[in-house]
Amino acid sequence: MIRLLTFVSLLLLGTVSAWAQTTDTTPAEDREALRKFFQSKFPDIPLDAYKDGAYIFDPKARAQFEEIEEFPPWEFDVEEGEELFNTPFKNGKTYADCFENGGIGIAQKYPLWDEKRQEVVTLPYAINLCREANGEQPLPYEKSDLLKVQAYMAYTSRGKRIEAPEPTGKALEAYKKGREYYYSKRGQLDMTCANCHLQHAASRLRYELPGPLLGQTTHWPVYRSKWEELGDIQRRYKECNKQVRAKDLPYQAEEYRNLQYYMHLMDVGLEFNGPSSRK
Amino acid sequence: MIKKALSTFLLILLASASFHSQAQEDMDIEKIRAMGKQVVADRKKGNCVACHVIEDMEAPGTFGPPLIAMSARYPDKAKLRAQIWDATRRNMLTSMPPFGKHMILTEEEIDWVTEYIYSL
C-alpha cells in the first residue's frame, strides 16, 4: 500500500523542494502542500477557480455548463426541498430544530466532526439523524427526498466559504484515516484516488477528465446528466471505486465519511456553490 | 466463448508450429497481433486505449505516453512484457494497472498484447 505521504511528496519533488511531508503533517500543512502542487502544475489557474472542477481544464464543456446553469436543472428540487424542510414532522418539530441557525447557511460546514457522537457527520447523514431523533424513518441516500432537503440547505449556503475548525484528537485521527484512504491503491486495477485526481487531474481517460481533488467538495448535491437527477458526492465515490473494480461501500460508511472529511478540509476557504450540475 | 475458441486456435497453432514454413510463421504472428489488438481495445480487458494513444484506435486517453515506435524503444521484448505485467515495479506511483500481477489479463493474453504493442 502506498501512503499518501510518499505519494504527494514524490509527486511534489522538484516542484516544492523545501517541503517534505511526513505522516505527522497537519491538515493545514497538507492543504498548503496540495495548493502548491496544483499551483505549480497549473500556474494560470487561480485558487478560486477550483470550485468548478474539471471544467477549468475544458473550456468547451465549461461553456455548456454555464449555459445549463442559466436554467439550472436542480431548481425545482431546491423549491421542493424548501417545502419539505419546512413541513413539520409528526411530533410538530421541523428540520430547523436540529441545526445551528435553523439549518440556514450552514452546509459549507459539513462534513464536521461531531464531538458528542465521536464521528464525522456529513450533511445527508445529519438530515437522517434529525429525522430519527424526531421519530421519523431515515430516507435512502439515493433517489429520495433527502437530496431535495440537502439541495435546499446547500442553496442557502451559496457564496459562503468552506469552513472547518482545525481537527485535533479523535477528529484528527478520522482525518488521517480519510487521507490514508485517498492515497491507498485499491481494486483490481490497483489505483489510488490520487492517481486520477492529482497526478492525472487534467488528463483524458478516454473522453473523461477526472478533475482535481481541490474543489471536489464545494458543490453538492450535483445534478449529473448521466444520472438525470441529483446525487451526493458519495454516489460518485461508489462510481470511482467501481471504475477501478474495488469493493463498493454502503452510503455513509465510516470510511466514506472520513474520506469526505479529508477532502472537505482540503477545500477550506473555497467558495461553496452547491447545488450544481455536472455532465 | 470467443476466448475459448481463441485458445483452442492457439493450441493448434502451437502444436503445428514445427511444420510451419517461414511464410506461415509470418501469418501466424499477424494472427497473434490481431488477437492482441482485440485485447488492447476491449474495455473489459486491456482497455489500454483509455490511457494511451494507439494507432487506428478511437477516443484515446492521455494518462500514459503514446504507444509508438515500441520495438525501437523496447528492443528487449521481455522488458515490454514486464511493463505490461506489472508497471508498478518500474514506477511505484504509476496509474497503470498491473495486468499480470492482478490477473486482469491471462498470461496468454499478455503474450498477445506484447506482440501487438511491439509491432507499433
Image (cartoon, rainbow, N blue to C red):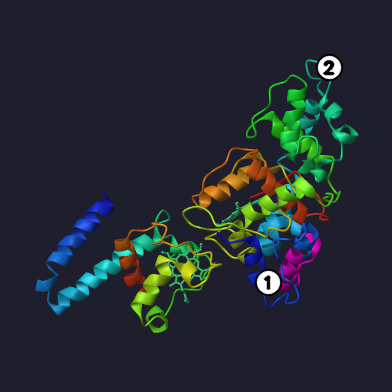
Q: Which chain letter goes with mark 2?
A: A
Structural distance between the alpha carbons of marks 2 and 1: 55 Å
Dot 1: element: helix
Is residue B108 shown to the viewer in this render? yes
Which one is in front, A89 or B56?
A89
* Badge 2 or badge 1: first in the primary sequence: 1
The answer to whether A99 is drawn above or below residue B40 in the figure is: above
| Residue at 79 percent of width and 19 percent of height | A89
Tell whether position A38 is magenta.
Answer: yes
**Whole-percent x and y of residue A198?**
65, 63
Q: Nearer the viewer, mark 2 or mark 1?
A: 1
Three-letter code for the amino acid on which mark 2 is drawn: Gly
**Whole-percent x and y of residue A133?**
77, 24
Which one is in front, B51 or A190?
A190
| Residue at 84 percent of width and 50 percent of height | A163
Identify the image quadrant of residue A184. Answer: bottom right
Magenta range: A33-49
**Whole-percent x and y of residue A218?**
76, 50
Q: Which mark is residue A12?
A: 1
Q: Which mark is residue A92?
A: 2
